[in-house]
Amino acid sequence: MGKVDQEWYETTEEEMMAYVGVLDGKKPGELLSVEAELARLTRSTYPAAQLLQRPLPDGVDPTRLEFYLDPNHFQILQFLDTSLNRYSQNPFNNDQPLAIVI
C-alpha cells in the first residue's frame, strides 16, 4: 500500500467529512445552521439566472431545469420562446425587429 493510500485509510470519518465539505465550498470548521441547510436543500424553485449558472444548486437535476424554474420566470421564458419561434418562421415578414431584454 502506497503512502497516499495508507494516509487515506488512516483518516477518521470526521476528517473525511471535513474534506468533502471543503470540496463542496465550505470552510474548515464552519458551523452551519440546520434551518438554513434544510431550507437550501428543500428549495423547489429558482430564478432563471441561478439555473443558468454552473455549478447548479444542490439537488437540481440538470436534465429537468424547467421543473425548478420560478413560475414568473417560466412565463417570461415561455413568451420569449414563442416570440422567437414566430420570428424564426418568417423573420422578413415582421414589421419590427425582435428585441429581447432580460
Image (cartoon, grey):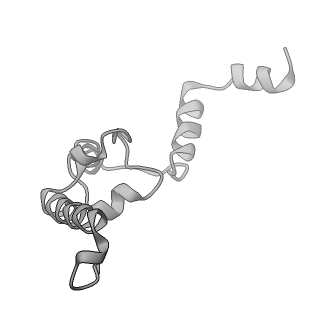
> Residue shown at 55%/49% (left/top)?
28
Most extreme residue toward the right is 2
> Residue shown at 25%/47% (left/top)?
66
Q: Nearer the viewer, residue 14 or 57?
A: 57
In the image, residue 102 above or below residue 13 = below
In the image, residue 88 above or below residue 14 = below
Most extreme residue toward the bottom is 96
In the image, residue 16 above or below residue 53 = above
> Residue shown at 28%/79% (left/top)?
98
The N terminus - image quarter: top right
Percent x, y for residue 22? 56, 46
Q: Nearer the viewer, residue 56 or 27?
A: 56
Percent x, y for residue 56? 41, 49
Residue 7 seen in this snapshot: yes
> Residue shown at 14%/61% (left/top)?
75
Q: Is residue 19 left or right of residue 72?
A: right
Percent x, y for residue 69? 22, 53
Percent x, y for residue 55? 47, 51
Residue 8, quarter of the rendered image? top right
